[in-house]
Image: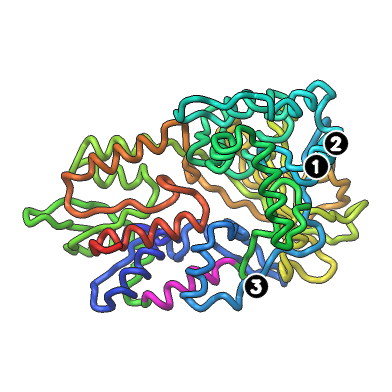
């Protein structure tokens, strides 16, 4: 395994469970397992440096959590505050109830919102009358939304919501890779609105309220003691003796007998029957370019962007009005340096001491990387200034930090699926090697865990 993120750990766990006698090693240049999953505990705060939870709509992730004995550690989002806000003309405005990332499931709530102009709302109401596409070619998010709902919805709601998830430019973001269920709604129902309404009806019949705005927060969970509960448990099950953390792989080359020779910066020189590449695509491309210039260049061509998270902690008394939502997103058109903010201690229990508030501010994206310029103090000042302006916070944060993620977020541009399929085909002439990780088949924890499990099955030649 090259990479100890959720994909690499998922693959290593699956291999060792299917055959405990296998000689499996997990290499990672970082000193910790989990990749972007990291949790800091300081002064009573539980601070997530990476993801603060994961969505359960893909039920295999809950089965996986059950397999590794962590079901009793899961917590849902708090019942109160299950709404999101969006910045509009310098003010925080609630996202309409029933709005699900790309479209409204409840038209009346949407029509009452001040976010769109009357003409913009009229264009959205016309969506059920718009004929669906005849072909199945991939399409950008921006193209899809303009075609179905018009440009105003894209600018005011869809771009900031999608940007908060993928830190991506909607003009290039692949619909097929990132929001396939909306493509399927158009195909099956001839309309996204009709598809959302049918889904809402089914949700209510199953006992759900369907009232959350933006993301469906009732589907999100975390671990009561922090997200690093997951990688710690996987390392425990895989075995510490198999982990080679702080070991940067420096060379990966085919052997004459169809295996892989792996060398690292600690002097290890090992030969393996198969490799699972679970690190960033460009890094793996650098390791494979001597074995195959074509494969190496294809991996390096997977685009990535950078981002940063400023974590700020305050006394609740510092706010004119205590935040009662899970956070807010910011349209690019607002011209602000942040793309979103998450009120983590409102979202999940046990994240801050009594009387304190924990906020994570997300900066930088594929649209505007300039927000990441300057030192950490500058980013903290910028993030704090935005909270002063938007939330009326008084005084300085009682705790603050910045975590940067340089070229860490893959960009799923239009045609991504075809390019990855061609990449895997090009790898056919190499000794056994499998790809797993956020650069290929999905960026969330459920997707990367599932990719790791699938890669392990292919290594063993079993389903």
Task: Look at the image and tell me in which quarter the N terminus lies.
Answer: bottom left
Q: Nearer the viewer, residue 164 or 141?
A: 141
Whether residue 130 is visible to the viewer of this picture, yes or no, is yes
Task: Look at the image and tell me in which quarter the C terminus lies.
Answer: bottom left
Residue at 51%, 74% (x, y): give it: 66
Q: Earlier in the sequence, mark 3 or mark 1?
A: 1
Q: Which residue in the protein does label 1 denote?
A: 96
Percent from the top left, x then y, of residue 430?
A: 17, 47
Residue 270 lies in quadrant? bottom left
The answer to whether the residue labelled 3 contacts the one labelled 1, judged by CB atoms less than 8 Å apart, is: no
Residue at 56%, 43% (x, y): give it: 181
Q: Which mark lies nearer to you, 3 or 1? A: 1
Q: Main secondary structure of the magenta part?
A: helix
Q: Which residue in the protein does label 3 denote?
A: 224
Q: Which residue in the protein does label 2 denote?
A: 113
For the magenta stretch, what is the residue range? 227-238
- The numbered dot on residue 299 is none
What SS does tag 3 mark? loop
In the rendered structure, the answer to whether residue 332 lies left or right of residue 85 reads left
In the rendered structure, the answer to whether residue 160 lies left or right of residue 239 reads right
Q: Give how far apart the Cα atoms at labels 2 and 3 are.
A: 35 Å
Percent from the top left, x then y, of residue 84?
A: 77, 48
Specify whether residue 199 is painted magenta: no
């Amino acid at each position: 395994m090259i990479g100890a993120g959720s994909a690499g750990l998922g693959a290593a766990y699956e291999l060792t469970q299917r055959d405990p006698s296998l000689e499996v090693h997990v290499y990672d240049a970082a000193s910790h397992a989990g990749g972007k999953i990291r949790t800091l505990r300081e002064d009573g705060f539980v601070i997530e440096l990476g993801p603060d939870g994961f969505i359960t709509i893909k039920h295999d992730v809950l089965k996986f959590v059950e397999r590794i004995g962590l079901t009793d550690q899961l917590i849902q989002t708090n019942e109160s505050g299950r709404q999101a806000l969006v910045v509009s003309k310098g003010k925080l405005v609630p996202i309409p109830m029933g709005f699900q990332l790309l479209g409204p499931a409840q038209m009346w709530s949407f029509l009452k919102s001040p976010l769109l102009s009357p003409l913009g709302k009229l264009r959205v109401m016309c969506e059920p009358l718009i004929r669906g596409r005849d072909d199945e070619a991939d399409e950008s998010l921006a193209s899809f939304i303009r075609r179905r709902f018009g440009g105003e919805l894209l600018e005011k709601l869809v771009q900031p919501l999608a940007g908060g998830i993928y830190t991506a430019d909607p003009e290039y973001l692949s619909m097929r890779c990132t929001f396939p269920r909306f493509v399927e709604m158009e195909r099956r129902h001839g309309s996204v609105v009709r598809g959302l309404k049918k889904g809402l009806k089914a949700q209510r019949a199953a006992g759900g309220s369907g009232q959350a705005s933006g993301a469906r927060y009732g589907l999100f969970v975390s671990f009561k003691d922090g997200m690093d509960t997951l990688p710690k448990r996987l390392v425990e099950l895989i075995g510490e003796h198999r982990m080679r953390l702080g070991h940067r792989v420096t060379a990966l080359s085919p052997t004459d007998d169809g295996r892989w020779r792996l060398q690292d910066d600690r002097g290890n020189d090992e030969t393996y029957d198969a490799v699972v590449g679970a690190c960033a695509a460009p890094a793996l491309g650098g390791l494979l370019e001597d074995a195959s210039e074509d494969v190496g260049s294809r991996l390096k061509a997977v685009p990535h962007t950078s981002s940063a998270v400023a974590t700020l902690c305050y006394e609740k008394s510092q706010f004119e009005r205590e935040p009662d939502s899970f956070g807010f997103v910011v349209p690019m058109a607002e011209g602000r340096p942040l793309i979103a903010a998450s009120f983590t201690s409102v979202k999940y229990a046990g994240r801050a001491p009594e009387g304190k508030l924990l906020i994570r501010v997300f900066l930088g994206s594929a649209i505007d990387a300039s927000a990441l310029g300057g030192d950490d103090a500058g980013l903290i000042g910028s993030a704090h200034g935005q909270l002063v302006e938007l939330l009326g916070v008084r005084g300085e944060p009682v705790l603050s930090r910045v975590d940067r993620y340089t070229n860490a977020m893959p960009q799923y541009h239009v045609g991504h699926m075809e390019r990855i399929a061609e990449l895997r085909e090009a790898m056919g002439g190499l000794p056994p090697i499998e790809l797993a990780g956020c650069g290929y088949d999905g960026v969330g924890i459920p997707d990367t865990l599932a990719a790791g499990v699938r890669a392990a099955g292919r290594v063993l030649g079993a389903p």
